[in-house]
Image (tube, rainbow, N blue to C red):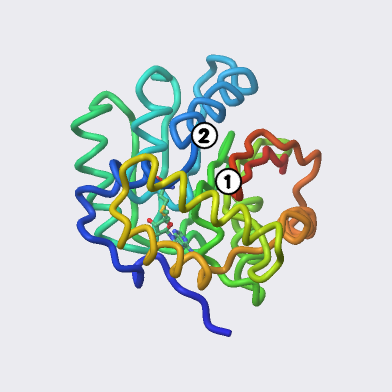
Amino acid sequence: MSTLEFKDQKLPSLDHYATLAEKFIPARHAIFTTIEAAFVELLESRPAKVLVVGAGGGEEIVRLGQKNQSWSFVGVDTYEPMIELAHKRISANAPQANYELAAIPLADLEETDFDAATCILTAHFVPDDGSKLALFKDIRARLKPGAPLAIVDGVGTSGEPRTELLRRFWKQHALLNGADPEMVESNAENFRKVAVVSTERELELLAEAGFSDLQPIFKALAIEGWLAFA
Ligand SMILES: C[S@@+](CC[C@H](N)C(=O)[O-])C[C@H]1O[C@@H](n2cnc3c(N)ncnc32)[C@H](O)[C@@H]1O
C-alpha cells in the first residue's frame, strides 16, 4: 500500500504550521523541553553537533538553539517549503543559533560524527518497506558511537481497537484546542494513510539499525518518543 507523504497532506498555509501543530500534537511543547533536558544532561555544556532529521518548520533549532549556544545544528528535510519556513522561524525566534539547513535526503548528507540527533514526527512519514530501516541506519551512521537519538513518532495499527480509541481521543483533543472541525476530520483521514507502525515495530527497526539501550521518554495518546543510543 502506498503511504501518504507529508507534502501531500492538505496543509492550509505553512506559515501557520507551528500554531496548528501546537493544537494537534498533544503536549507538543513538552516534547522539545523533554529532549532538550535529556541532551543538556547527556551532552553537558560541551560544544556539540546536533543532527536534525525532518528539520522543516524549524522547531527543534528554535527550541534547542535558544539557550544552548555551544551546540551547532545541521538540519535536513526533503520538502523545500518546510526548510524555507525553518529559516524564517529560526531567524525570528533564535537568531543566535548556529545552524545549517539543507533540503536533501539524509542519505545525501556527507557530514558525520554528530554528538546527538533528533527525528521528531518525521519517520512516521517514511514507509516500512525498507525505507524506514534505511533512514534509521543513515542516522546511526552519522552519530558518534554511543551518541543519543531522540525520536518521536505517531504509533499504532489502523483497525486495532486500542489504536482507534486513541485516535478518537486525539480528534477530541484537537477540537478542545480550538482546531477547525473540518481540518480535524481531514487530518484524521490523513493520519490513517501515513506510514505509522506499532511501538513494537518501531523499536524492532531501531534495534535492527543498531541502536541500543532504548529508553521511553515521551507518551501522549498515540505519540511516543524514545532515546536510542548509537
Ligand atoms: C510533521 S513535520 C515535523 C517537523 C518538525 N520535526 C517538527 O516536529 O515540528 C514532518 C517533516 O518531516 C519531513 N520529512 C518527511 N519525510 C522525510 C524524510 N525521509 N527525510 C527528511 N525529512 C522528511 C517533512 O517534509 C516535514 O517537514
Residue positioned most to the top: 45
Quadrant of the rendering where the C terminus is positioned? top right
Q: Residue 152 carries which label?
A: 1
Which quarter of the figure has residue 38?
top right
Within 10 Å of disc 1 (Cα), the crowding (few <14, some 14-19, many 20+) is: many
At mark 2, the secondary structure is helix
Amino acid beneath label 1:
Val
Residue 16 lies, with reference to residue 217, above or below; the image says below
Q: Is residue 216 left or right of residue 188?
A: right
Q: Name the residue under label 2.
A: 31
- The residue nearer to you, when weighing 5 against 55, is 5
Q: Residue at x 49, y 34 (%)?
A: 27
Amino acid beneath label 2:
Ile
Q: Where is residue 12 in the image (x, y as percent from the top left)?
A: 22, 60
Residue 150 lies, with reference to residue 82, above or below; the image says above
Ligand 1 neighbours mark 1 (CB distance < 8 Å): yes
